[in-house]
Image: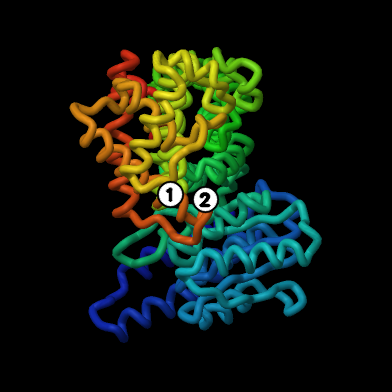
Amino acid sequence: MNNIMAQIKEKARYWKSMDRSNEEKRREAEKYYKENIMPLLVTMFKESESDVQDCEHLILTLGTSYEPVVFSILGLKPKNVLILYTPESRNKLDDVIYFTNLKPSQYEAEEVDSTNILILYEKIKNYYERYGKPQNTYVDFTGGTKAMSVGCGMAAALIGSKVVYIASKYLNEYRKPEPGTERICVIDNPYEVFGDIRRKEAVSLFNKMDYNTAYYVFSELSDTVPGTKEYEALKYLSLAYDQWDSLNIFQALENLKQCKRSAEKECIMNKNHLLAKHLEILEKQIKYLEKLNNVDLKNTNKNKRLLFKNIEYLIFMLYQNALRREQQGKYEMASLLLYRILEMMSQSRLWERGIDTEQVTEENYSTLGMEPEVLLQKINYIKKKIEEKPLESLPSEISLLMGYIILGVIRDNLIEAENENKLIRKIRELKGKVISRNNGIFAHGFQFQEKESYEKFKITVMEYLIRYCHIQSINMDEILKEMEFIKL
């Protein structure tokens, strides 16, 4: 081996001294390298001892330089080879076969698009599955474009193969490595190199509120990247937010607690942990979820007193949900949530006056400080003004619009107006919003909510929400901030 290295250095000195002043001279230098240095490098790799044993399959990307592919094949001595080339590198296949002496039965060559990572991944995946998912598979990402290298590494990670590359001292002036410095490097876990790519992808998915997909990517990172528990916490956070978004409060609470426990331990050692600056907010969100979980939203009829005691948390949970749907352009769903918030506020105010809007008796109406007959008369007066049919009797169930009419009649602060005309104007405006919502595709009609109409409705809901918070002594800014899902 020492004799070969001495010959390589001698030939390399002459090769580097060769004239390259024009294209013809550069071709002569390239020819000298190929005929005098390359055979010595081939011998060096054939005689070298590799850390890799029993390489059954080797998958490589071929760029415009054939040398690293040759070195990898000679050093790893695979039984089967898949070479992925581009139209630009197709002519280098002959050099690879010439220097490696691969038999036709030993190798396959597939053309790929140098910019299409998906096609490259599919080629690798199909090859891997066709051979029965062999364990001793290695992937070399040295050759080809950066996109090919990234795709190759990610594919290797997903099929669970080892990753290798040809390291060397690169000579920019000669556009080749220093002859004799080439060596094979093995990465036991490809995510040590490519984990940051998946990390960025997962963070982007999370910040786009695709919590379900982010959960699966963070789970994959948690299982494959060594030396950190950060992904464990982010996995639980993504799952918690996905469940919270779906109003699965109990599971969201459990997973958010898991997230915080994991993050607190890790943040002591890692000040750059993505959740280090969010621990206080996560603690407050856990407390909100605990309150909501105690209400038991699946069985609210059993304990409505507890429900209305904590109604503000439910209102702002739905409001933040609506804002997330708004950011996603899902205005129909956002409108539906805002409509429910508007209804909840009237239900809350009526509950405080002894009225359960889902089941009301005439005796209940007496708690409003007005004779039922007088109340019915005043309700019908407003209904006539807004072109609604009059009631024959007080309703046993109170709708959103009826709730605000009743609150207006008894001069509740939520909709109190300076005079009768202004009250009727407010009720008429609410009626328009109700009609618009009822015509929506998620209600009783076939219309889709446009952004402009949604924003107008949101302004109306916000006006009532601000008034409601003032009446109930709720710190609206604080609870809005604390219930907002964090960004990474």
Q: Is residue 341 above or below residue 45?
A: above
Q: Extreme left residue here?
A: 418
Q: In this view, does 442 lie above or below 268?
A: below
Please state, as top left, top right, bottom left or bottom right, where the N terminus lies in the image. Answer: bottom right
The structure residue drawn at horizontal position 60% and vertical position 56%, both measured from the top left corner, is 155
> According to the image, what is the colour scheme of the structure?
rainbow
The structure residue drawn at horizontal position 34% and vertical position 36%, both measured from the top left corner, is 381
Q: Is residue 315 above or below residue 47?
A: above
Circle 2: residue type? Ala
Contact? badges 1 and 2 (CB < 8 Å): yes
How many numbered marks, from 0 up? 2
Number of the label disc, if any, that sits on residue 398: none
Crowdedness near tag 2: few (<14), some (14–19) or many (≥20) residues, C-alpha within 10 Å: few
Q: What element carries label 2?
A: loop
Which residue position is annotated with label 1? 437
Q: Can residue 208 be seen at all in this image of the molecule?
A: no
Which residue position is annotated with label 2? 443
Give how far across and how far down residue 152 sits, in percent.
Answer: 56, 59
Nearer to us in this view, 137 or 338: 338
Circle 1: residue type? Arg
**Image quarter of residue 97:** bottom right
Crowdedness near tag 1: few (<14), some (14–19) or many (≥20) residues, C-alpha within 10 Å: many
Nearer to us in this view, 323 or 127: 323
Give how far across and how far down residue 375 sits, in percent.
Answer: 41, 25
